Image (cartoon, rainbow, N blue to C red):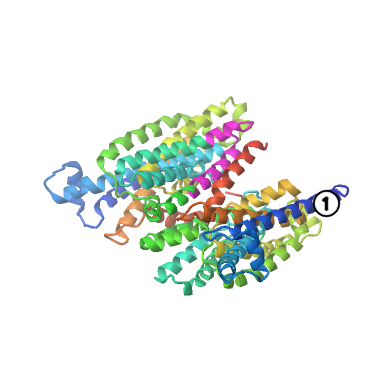
């Protein structure tokens, strides 16, 4: 183990730096594609304050906030997935399983059912409703799966999660079938994960949460490693399993809830990013968490760019692009591995 | 036990036929069924609208429940249901494509296409299982199924959004017996009945498989062959049902659990019991969806979830071991 750690650490630094470069490249490409094209030089010039006023408006008012939201949400989803898989000891766990997507969808449906105007003034309220919905779903699931004797047991968490998610889906469907067509297609688009019309306010709302939760989860890497040994072994090496599990779970929930509420219900990132990261840097959470975050970021930013540039005029939401590319790859991994 | 469940089924069928937007007396129902007179409006309502719906609910409820029981038996996973085989997602995807490229197709055609989609979705998972070294192990089947289902439903969403038909698809997906007519029933009922009868001999092998693969091999069971037959039966049962009424989840998940509580672990008893209970659940859910807010109908899928979710939660909480 000891002889292994330094080389693994080196490898993970190389991987992380490479991923960071890829992420920056993707962000720059994303910044200069769109209905109005900006050359990379113009992007850089504008960023340093020497661009034309048109370029400035396009970049600062429209593209940059949108991309920052995707960057933050992608990293958030990837890391939340890594944490959840560590907490539940289940490689299939992702934020969707905890009912977060279903809850967010329900929150959105409640919002669009209540209000019939969708102008920009209320746009800030949508993430708020979605956030409330996903937190509500997560709380219901955690309360129902809490047991006086064992705390939150992973298997019960998953079982209850599936049922509660199904319940929220039914409620969402019930509300959505009563909407008029325009509102419904707006909602469907949003639910499939489109990062449309995001503003600097959204970046400001997202940033503190993402930074706080990510740093806390990263600082608890050792605990997550210990969970992998099983509850008994983890307790015997001095890990307070029950309390740590609840706190980490809350963190992961908060992280994915804010990400989902800003970027829509994007599955697969939370599932696939940790798997990819594990292949690259191994199972130690200290290395795994940054890698998963960077991979999630790259995936979401590229998917959003592809979705909004290739499929004109009806942009395809990023979530669809992610699943269409991510699923075949995941299946390939599944078939290849023993 | 079985007799009382059959009695409940008959009773609920009778209630479902007599209740509805237009209240009819039991006497009318009786004569309409056994001495049908096409000249009378109440007789027509019963014969042309309610009877086919109730019969469809019986058969399709039984089919979904048995398909779920078979899935849980051969995957040894208590959470397995037909959604895992990509049946619902495949059907939805092909229906989305047909809405996009051939708008205004008649109901019968959509049914046919969605059955094709259901089979294709499952075929995809079969092929993946075969490509893998070691073949279709239970866990691989489950994982591949979940991923294929997620991909296909995501692609359906993409198609629906690109062609602006999200809500049409949602209506189809939510499920309902409203469009069922006698001529569809004449196609659906024989297929489902024959499949249900044919799988009864499989039940014993599924029981042994549910004890574990090693046990089954030691007892001389051909695992691949049993699994293949059972999955083929599941595709027919669930594929036909999904294409007739849309995607109704939870029947296949919940009913086998209840059956197991009532009759134990032997699939020779679980399968018939599941078919009866599934029938009762869907007859009542369809009835509920008609009478909650007449003349509008609530989607049956929603109704089933409202009943199924609390029950499943109760099961999940009560069980000490992992279900």
Q: Quadrant of residue B136?
A: top right
For disc 1, the neighbor class at 10 Å (few under 14, some 14 to 19, many from 20) is: few
Residue B149: x and y in percent read 51, 45
Q: Is residue A244 visible?
A: yes
Residue B128: x and y in percent read 57, 35
**Residue drawn at the location 39% of the way across and 51% of the way down:** B169
Along the viewing direction, whichever of A39 and B204 lies nearer the viewer: A39
Predominant SS of the magenta segment: helix
In the displayed image of the protein, which residue is found farthest to the top? B220
Q: Quadrant of residue B237?
A: top left
Residue B115: x and y in percent read 39, 38
**Image: A121 above or below A98:** below
Q: Is residue A86 magenta?
A: no
**Residue drawn at the location 65% of the way across and 69% of the way down:** A207
Along the viewing direction, whichever of B33 and A37 lies nearer the viewer: A37
Q: Quadrant of residue A99?
A: bottom right
**Image: B270 above or below B133:** below
Residue extent of the magenta highlight: B125-154
- Identify the secondary structure beneath mark 1: helix
Q: Is residue B277 visible?
A: no
Q: Is residue B149 magenta?
A: yes
Q: What's the chain of the residue with tag 1?
A: A
Q: Is residue A102 left or right of residue B27?
A: right
In the displayed image of the protein, which residue is found farthest to the left? B39
Q: Which residue is mark 1?
A: A10
């Amino acid at each position: 183990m000891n002889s292994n750690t330094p080389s693994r650490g080196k490898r993970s630094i190389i991987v992380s730096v490479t991923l960071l470069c890829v992420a920056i490249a993707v962000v720059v490409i994303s910044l200069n594609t769109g209905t109005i094209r900006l050359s990379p030089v113009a992007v850089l010039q504008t960023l340093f304050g020497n661009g034309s006023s048109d370029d400035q408006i396009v970049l600062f008012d429209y593209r940059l906030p949108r991309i920052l939201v995707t960057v933050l949400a992608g990293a958030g989803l990837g890391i939340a997935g890594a944490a959840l898989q560590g907490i539940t000891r289940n490689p299939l766990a992702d934020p969707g399983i905890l009912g977060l997507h279903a809850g967010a969808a329900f929150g959105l449906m409640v919002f669009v059912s209540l209000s019939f105007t969708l102008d920009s003034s209320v746009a800030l309220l949508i993430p708020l409703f979605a956030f409330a919905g996903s937190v509500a779903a997560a709380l219901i699931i955690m309360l129902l799966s809490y047991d006086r004797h064992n705390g939150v047991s992973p298997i019960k968490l998953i079982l209850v999660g599936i049922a509660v998610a199904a319940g929220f889906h039914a409620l969402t469907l019930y509300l959505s079938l009563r909407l008029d067509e325009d509102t419904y297609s707006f909602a469907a688009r949003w639910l499939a994960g489109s990062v449309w019309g995001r503003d600097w306010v959204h970046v400001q709302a997202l940033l503190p949460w993402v930074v706080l939760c990510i740093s806390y989860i990263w600082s608890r890497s050792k605990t997550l490693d210990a969970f992998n040994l099983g509850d008994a072994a983890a307790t015997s090496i001095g890990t307070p399993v029950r309390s740590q599990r609840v706190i980490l779970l809350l963190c992961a929930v908060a992280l994915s809830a804010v990400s989902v509420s800003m970027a829509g219900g994007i599955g697969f990132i939370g599932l696939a990013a940790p798997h990819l990261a594990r292949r690259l840097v191994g199972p130690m959470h200290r290395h795994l968490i940054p890698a998963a975050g960077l991979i999630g970021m790259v995936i979401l930013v590229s998917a959003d760019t592809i979705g909004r540039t290739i499929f004109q005029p009806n942009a395809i939401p990023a979530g669809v692009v992610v699943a269409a590319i991510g699923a075949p790859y995941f299946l390939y991994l599944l078939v290849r591995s023993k | 036990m079985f007799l009382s469940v059959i009695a409940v089924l008959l009773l609920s069928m009778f209630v479902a036929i007599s209740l509805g937007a237009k209240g009819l007396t039991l006497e009318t129902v009786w004569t309409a069924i056994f001495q049908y007179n096409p000249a009378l409006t109440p007789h027509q309502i019963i014969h042309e609208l309610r009877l086919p719906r109730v019969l469809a609910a019986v058969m399709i409820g039984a089919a979904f429940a048995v398909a779920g029981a078979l899935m849980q038996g051969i995957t040894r996973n208590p959470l397995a249901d037909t959604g895992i085989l990509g049946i619902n997602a495949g059907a939805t995807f092909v229906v989305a494509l047909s809405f996009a490229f051939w708008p205004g197709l008649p109901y019968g055609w959509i049914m046919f296409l969605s059955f094709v989609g259901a089979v294709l979705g499952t075929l995809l998972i079969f092929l993946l299982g075969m490509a893998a070294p070691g073949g279709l192990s239970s866990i691989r089947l489950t994982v591949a199924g979940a991923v294929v289902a997620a991909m296909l439903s995501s692609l359906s969403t993409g198609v629906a959004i690109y062609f602006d038909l999200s809500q049409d698809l949602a209506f189809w997906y939510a499920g309902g017996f409203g469009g069922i007519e006698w001529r569809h029933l004449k196609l659906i009922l024989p297929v489902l009945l024959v499949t249900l009868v044919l799988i009864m001999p499989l039940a014993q092998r599924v029981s042994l498989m549910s004890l574990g693969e090693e046990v089954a091999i030691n007892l001389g069971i051909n695992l691949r062959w049993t699994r293949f037959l059972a999955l083929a039966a599941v595709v027919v049962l669930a594929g036909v049902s999904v294409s007739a009424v849309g995607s109704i989840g939870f029947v296949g998940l919940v009913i086998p659990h209840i059956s197991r509580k009532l009759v134990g672990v032997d699939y020779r008893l679980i399968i018939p019991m599941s078919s009866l209970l599934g029938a009762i659940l869907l007859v009542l859910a369809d009835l509920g969806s008609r009478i909650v807010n007449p003349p509008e109908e609530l989607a049956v899928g929603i109704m089933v979830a409202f009943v199924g979710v609390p029950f499943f939660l109760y099961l999940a909480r009560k069980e000490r071991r992992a279900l």
